[in-house]
Amino acid sequence: MRARATLAAVLAVVVPLTAAAACQGAARSTRPTPSRATAGAPTATPGTARPSSRPVRRPKAPAGMTAGYVVFDRAAGRVTVQHNAHHRFRSASVVKILIALDYLAARRAGTEIPANDLALLRSMLRASDDDAATTLWTRGGRARVIERMTAALRLTDTAPPPVGKPGFWGYTAISAADVVRMYRYLLDPAHRRFGDFIMGHLRRATQCAADGFDQYFGIPAALPRPWAIKQGWSGYGSVPPERCVRIGTSGYRLPASGRRTGPGVDLVRPVLHTTGTAGPGDRMIVAVLSVQPASSTWRSSVARLTGFTKAVYRAAGGQTR
């Protein structure tokens, strides 16, 4: 396996312009340079939430659903609402952010990303392509991808899949707090070359995923644009019970018809996650992770998580649809 960059090199790598070109046309965020006192958070941006001194009432998860969530206001430089922030969930496709970041970090400065790899990254990030993720996961050394990224981003709850399931990238353990840290890393000006590439694709996430599931639930359904998303789902089968029908980009509506992972990670019940940013300049970082009731259908899970995401965002001071 080729030698990997050290952490210092990771932070200094410049993704070549040929890679950035893959995201041309995507809306770019306006990110003022933060002061040392508010590293990772820009100065005030017009927007989605108004920090308040009033006590925040944390939304309660619907019956049967286990949830962990964090909303971080980058303009205020603080978490505005959170619950079970460090509870571990299996990641499903949210881990694709780390797979992409690990790939980019491994590139030598000034080298071009091969066209085939650009296609894999684009499909994995925009359409949540599982085959593309498996290719890059295997090439990156599987669990080593997570080991490198937890060290580089200083993630505290993220862990590789169980030893007996090394190929199951979706069994990576994550928390809402760590997901917010991932986005803060990507949006930090110091990591702009990585962030512009990955966030550019997440802003152009397709409604219909590569496997036919409709991924415009949660953030896209509950919050007004602009937003960027990386969704996750697992436990609903390989074929969607209601195949996605694209209805445009204005909003979502339901179709008519182990050791490493550590204790407490549910690998059985279905999971549904919505993560990303919302508001001008990617002001709000939103991570809502959930384990759904065992008997949940796709339709009921999507409705449950979307309604809950709306409640969480309102509690954070944001405006919803």
Image: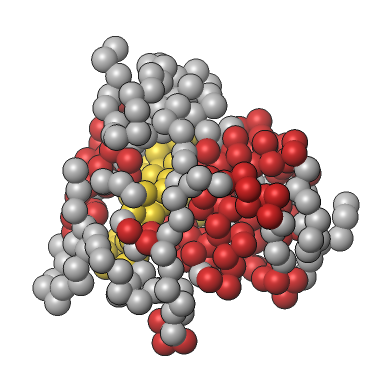
Q: Quadrant of residue 5?
A: bottom right
Front-lying residue, 224 or 58: 224
Q: Residue furthest top?
A: 257
The way the protein has been coloured in the rendering is: secondary structure
Number of numbered discs on residues: 0
311 relative to 164 in the view: left or right: left
Q: Position of residue 101 (x, y in %)?
A: 63, 55
Q: Position of residue 286 (x, y in %)?
A: 36, 55
Q: Residue furthest left?
A: 54
Q: Position of residue 254 (x, y in %)?
A: 28, 24
Q: Residue at x 30, y 74 (%)?
A: 44
Q: Quadrant of residue 256?
A: top left
Q: Residue at x 43, y 59 (%)?
A: 29
Q: Quadrant of residue 315?
A: bottom left
Front-lying residue, 243 or 204: 204
168 relative to 245 in the view: left or right: right
Q: Residue furthest bottom?
A: 37
Examine the rendering and report whether any part of residue 116 can be seen: yes
81 relative to 171 in the view: left or right: left
Image height of 204 relative to 255, above or below: below
Image height of 105 relative to 138, above or below: below
Q: Residue at x 68, y 55 (%)?
A: 17
Q: Residue at x 60, y 35 (%)?
A: 123
Image height of 182 relative to 199, above or below: below
Q: Position of residue 71 (x, y in %)?
A: 32, 61
Examine the rendering and report whether any part of residue 262 can be seen: no
Looking at the figure, which quarter contains the C terminus?
top left
Q: Residue furthest front?
A: 25
